[in-house]
Amino acid sequence: MSRSKPDDATRNLKTERLNEMAFSFKKTGALLAAIEVGLFTAISQGSRTLDEISRAIGIGREATDRLLIVCKVLGLVEEAGGEYTNAGDVERYLVRDQRAYFGDYLVYQAGSEYDSWKSVAANLRGGGEPDRGKIYLSLMSDPDEARRFTVAGYNSSLSLAHKLAKEFDFSPYRRWLDCGGGSGCYSIAACERNPGLETIILDLPNVIAVTKEFVAKHGLEKRIRTVAGNFFEAPFPEGCDLISFITPLQGYMPDEVIRLLTKSHRALVPGGTLLVLDYMLNDDKTGPLDPALMNLQGVQKGQLLGRVNSGAEFREFFTAAGFKDVSVRWFMPHQLGLVTADKAG
């Protein structure tokens, strides 16, 4: 009869944790399917029983039942007396036509990344040369892809934009340059709350074509101007007292980030502010998980598409660009950091 050795680290351990990691993709598939077939929207609009939901989404009763069972297990829907209701966060974020709906973003983003996670080991092999934005520039050169990307960004970030507009004081600023501003949702939210603010959104031409539509939708054409260009190459407008990079910097390597921060320092008026909102790691890089995964995903086919940095590293980058008294804090503790600094007066 064999016995475990005293130092056997596997004694009493189970496989549940490893299985959970290995098969999490099944949860993703179920969630995306429920969004795509309109399950949560049907429930919100009054289809409550299995038969009603089946008819509303146009899927057979048995297949609908199986999807609902998984959604119950995942806590996405609840059932009482044979009638279904959405969980609170599902009702707010995954029901089409709700103000905070971002189901299309999840379908687009998770769907586009889904297959690549099967090839992480292959992606890690290679020379580790920086991509320098080539893949992103190539994607955004396709008008249809740029539209899908920008619309998904608007759907996913509008509520986050209002959170920033509430938590960051935009009232002292008059002229804001948002580099890589995408759909314009951050400018839209800030302008709606600050009547004295005017903004300039700088992004690639096919993105800007969609940005203009969202700006017009909110009736802010007179206060939000758009400029088409690559923020590495395009000159920054003069007279800006606020410049921002909201989530594009994780797509670049440290030397490129410092280059952009230095360019911003030169362009700002004395006393102006640079704001960076981006994925951020703890200083000891023990988390959070989402930025850590984003950092790993930044290796594609042996090339480095960018890097997720820690708060301490952002301080170093800002200092190298000429800023002092850099402020770093968590904006969303599981994901995003907010870094700001003023140009000396």
Image (tube, rainbow, N blue to C red):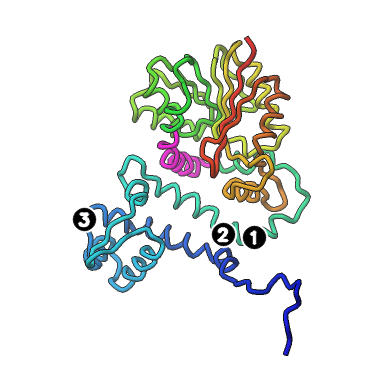
| Residue at the outermost bottom position | 1
Mark 1–mark 3 Cα distance, whole angstroms, equals 42 Å
Q: Amino acid at mark 2?
A: Asp
Of 40 and 72, nearer the camera is: 72
Which class describes the residues within 10 Å of circle 3: few (<14), some (14-19), or many (20+)? few
Label for residue 46? 3
Q: Quadrant of residue 9?
A: bottom right
Which is more N-terminal, label 2 or label 3? 3
- Name above or below for residue 242 compared with residue 204: above
Look at the picture and state if 170 lies above or below 285. above
Residue 95, how many percent across, how many down? 32, 49
The percent coordinates of residue 68 (x first, y second) are 34, 66
Q: Is residue 112 magenta?
A: no
Q: Measure the alpha-carbon separation of dots 2 and 1.
A: 8 Å
Magenta segment's dominant SS is: helix
Task: Tell me if residue 345 comes above or below residue 53 in the rendering.
Answer: above
Task: Describe the element under mark 3 as helix, strand or loop.
Answer: loop
Q: Which-is-in-front pick, marks 1 and 3?
A: 3
Query: Mark 1 or 3 closer to N-term?
Result: 3
Considering depth in this image, is 7 or 151 the residue closer to the camera? 7
Q: Nearer the viewer, mark 3 or mark 2?
A: 3
From the image, tell me which residue sits under label 2. Answer: 115
Check disc 1 and report its element: helix, strand or loop.
Answer: helix
Q: Amino acid at mark 3?
A: Gly
